Amino acid sequence: MLNNIIKFSFATVGCITGITLTRTFFIYQLTDISPEIKILAYIAIALALGFIFYTTSNKLIEIVMESLDRLELFIQKMTLYEMMVGSVGLIIGLIIANLVTIPIKNIDIIGTPVSIVVNILFGCLGIAVAAGKKNENIFESFRGRASDTSGKRRSDPKILDTSVIIDGRIIDICRSGFIEGELIVPSFVLDELRHIADSQDPLKRNRGRRGLDVLNMIQKDLQFPMRIETMEVSSDSEVDNALLKMAQKLGGKVLTMDFNLNKVANFQGVEVLNINELANAMKPIALPGEEMVVQVVKDGKENGQGVAYLDDGTMIVIDGGRKHIGEKLNVTVTSILQTAAGRMIFAKPKYLAEREI
């Protein structure tokens, strides 16, 4: 029943189109034709176009239904914010199109069709531009400008690589507060973690599950701002290339442990935060067994201890160094204590360490 109604609707549209075309292109220009012939021309062309529309309605219905199904799926995948941004872009595009077509509408014959095409083009263009800017939150932009005036800068998003998620040290870095801004997990990275977690190899499977546990801990236990960013990736495209494209698109930085990705990102102008480089920067300035020359400046809390300091203020507690206060002493590092308050080095005079050996 519904198909018949749609067919007759198409036939009606065809008849109306035929009457309009007849009036515009033929009858309106010929004033010497009798009214009877004009009426017959109206009827003939209207029926012809109505028949054409009716016979082709099945194919048109299939095209329309497929388009509606695709549109429905597309709308279901969109968030409310994306729909609002797209609507604003459509409205702005239609406003510009109507302003542009004001002089075009008065042109005979082609004025109306051209106006319709221009409205469609500008509407689609407005939606496309708005969709491209969907990651730039308008309210956050105003908030960012307000913070800029007060001397604060908005933090860039940090895009997580598979290697840094599996490593797990990102949890401690987030907990310490050294990471600012939003953490972004690309959808293709999440898919890669899921494939690794489903692997037949027990080592790969454990690594994949560890990565998923790390993400859950960051989001639920630490309650750190994190979201999943969807991006279409072709089957032959590598994850590293997709990461760099997303970083360029969002204006963010890539968190990784991959040395090769670090090199490629620097070549393409993408900022990278490498966890291994951070670890190297934070490694102890002295290791057990190393020798150094220090100035003993005062006695320590325990009996016989002396205290010295490095140039960066690190305290060195020297066992048996009390009698060398005011002297430069060659010492051997025995242990290092690292706490939240700082680093403390324990050492012995070199001659005492050599006696023990």
Image (cartoon, helix red, strand yellow):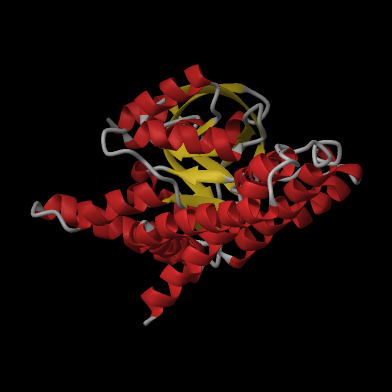
Residue 278, given in percent of the width and then of the height, sits at: 50, 35
Q: Residue at x 64, y 52 (%)?
A: 38
Residue 70, given in percent of the width and then of the height, sits at: 41, 59
Q: Return the residue found at the far left.
A: 200
Q: Return the residue found at the far top.
A: 267
Residue 296 visible, this angle: yes
In the image, is 344 to the left or to the right of 241?
right
Residue 351, given in percent of the width and then of the height, sits at: 41, 25
Please identify the quarter of the rendering in which residue 240 is found.
top left
Q: Return the residue found at the far right.
A: 149
The C terminus - image quarter: top left
In the image, is 274 to the left or to the right of 149?
left
Please identify the quarter of the rendering in which residue 213 is found.
bottom left
Q: Nearer the viewer, residue 310 or 256?
A: 256
**Up-down relation of residue 233 to residue 208 (above or below):** above
Q: Nearer the viewer, residue 7 or 102?
A: 7
Residue 303, given in percent of the width and then of the height, sits at: 55, 49
**Up-down relation of residue 310 to residue 52 (above or below):** above
Residue 180 visible, this angle: no
Q: Residue at x 42, y 38 (%)?
A: 256
